[in-house]
Image (cartoon, grey):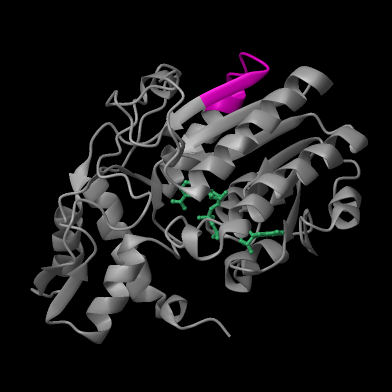
Amino acid sequence: MTRYLITGGAGYIGSSVADRLLQDANNEVIAFDNFSTGRREFIEDALKKPNYKLIEGDLLDTAAIDKAMEGIDFVFHFAANADIRRGCEHPRKDLEQNTIATFNVLDAMRRNKAREIVFSSTGPIYGEAQIIPTPEDAPLPIQTSLYGASKLACEGLIEAFCEGFGFTSYIFRFVSILGERYQHGHVYDFYKQLMETPERLYILGNGKQRKSYLYIQDCIDAIFTAVEHKENKVNIYNLGTPEYCEVTDSATWISEEMGLNPKFEFSGGDRGWVGDNPFIFLDTKKIQSLGWKPKLTIKEAVVQTVKYLKENEWLLEDRK
Ligand SMILES: NC(=O)c1ccc[n+]([C@@H]2O[C@H](COP(=O)([O-])OP(=O)(O)OC[C@H]3O[C@@H](n4cnc5c(N)ncnc54)[C@H](O)[C@@H]3O)[C@@H](O)[C@H]2O)c1
């Protein structure tokens, strides 16, 4: 039996990974979450399983994470402030929720002798990359968002713990993830807007930003593929589809799936917010060389996400 701890286990990606792990009755899954953005609805099924346990706690509480780490073999560290857009509104948040929280996880692992960690990093650590598609060994860029900078600091800490304390890490630099349980990002924002004003859609930037998105189940397949092929102490992979689209393409697919034909209005400029990269396209040859490839195209993933939101409009309500 392997004992897994998932930080952010009630979030979008964390709860989806928990469900995948629970398909094997030999896995024991412990979800750790402070419910800042996590949803109880995402873990309803998991809670019914005998090999699943929820711990409500905050990663800034070192005693709580230390206790949760007892007897853990393998950590999936997904808890974070995943809101890149509002970084400049609360500059400490990314430092605390991403970098310090990650240090607390690593140090609790060290004390409790847990030695393997999966970490969700992000495409924005490449800043405005000069090499596109951007490979994992692209030159260390100038950081353009507090979110990306905090995640890059997390990567550095993880690598140092691998060297210093014999950990093995799997660091994934994701593009934006789409699909079931999706609860933040452009599809969510556009869907919500179109429910309120079906005749028009306001798009940040000029709509020509080029983006690559990945379906959640493809993302999880990729994570497990990499873990199965453990190669080094530090294993870094880009995750994404081998294609990109423009934001207006996605807006068109979303509108069509909702049966609407809105007028698009643009805020203007080549980016939506500070730190928005007008062209993000990661080179995913490394993970593909292990035999993984995405099952859904970007368009299929966008459509799947809209279908999910249609069936789960409770997600659009403001949090209580
Ligand atoms: N969703 C994406 O498109 C995407 C893309 C790139 C990277 N990521 C990264 O993947 C990870 C998961 O993202 P997500 O989309 O599932 O986000 P999410 O907001 O749905 O999940 C994050 C979870 O962490 C919990 N959490 C946050 N701070 C915590 C703390 N201090 N203590 C305990 N729990 C805490 C939240 O309650 C939530 O359940 C994040 O690290 C994010 O940065 C996500």
Give the image quarter of residue 103. top right
Residue 235 included in the magenta stretch of the image: yes
Q: Position of residue 50 (x, y in %)?
A: 79, 58
In the image shown, does 138 or 315 lie closer to the viewer?
138
Q: Is residue 25 above or below residue 40?
A: above
Residue 114 included in the magenta stretch of the image: no
In the image shown, does 237 or 305 lie closer to the viewer?
237
Give the image quarter of residue 272. bottom left
Q: Splitting the image into four quadrants, where does ligand 1 fall?
A: bottom right
Give the image quarter of residue 110. top right
Magenta range is 226-236
* Left or right: residue 112 compared with residue 7: right
How many marks overall? Answer: 0
Q: Position of residue 271 (x, y in %)?
A: 25, 52
Q: Quadrant of the N terminus?
A: top right
Q: Is residue 42 above or below residue 262?
A: above
Residue sitting at x 45%, y 83%? 317
Asked if residue 297 can be seen in this view, the reply is yes
Residue sitting at x 14%, y 54%? 249
Q: Quadrant of the C terminus?
A: bottom right
* Left or right: residue 169 compared with residue 214: right
In the image shown, does 53 or 156 lie closer to the viewer?
156
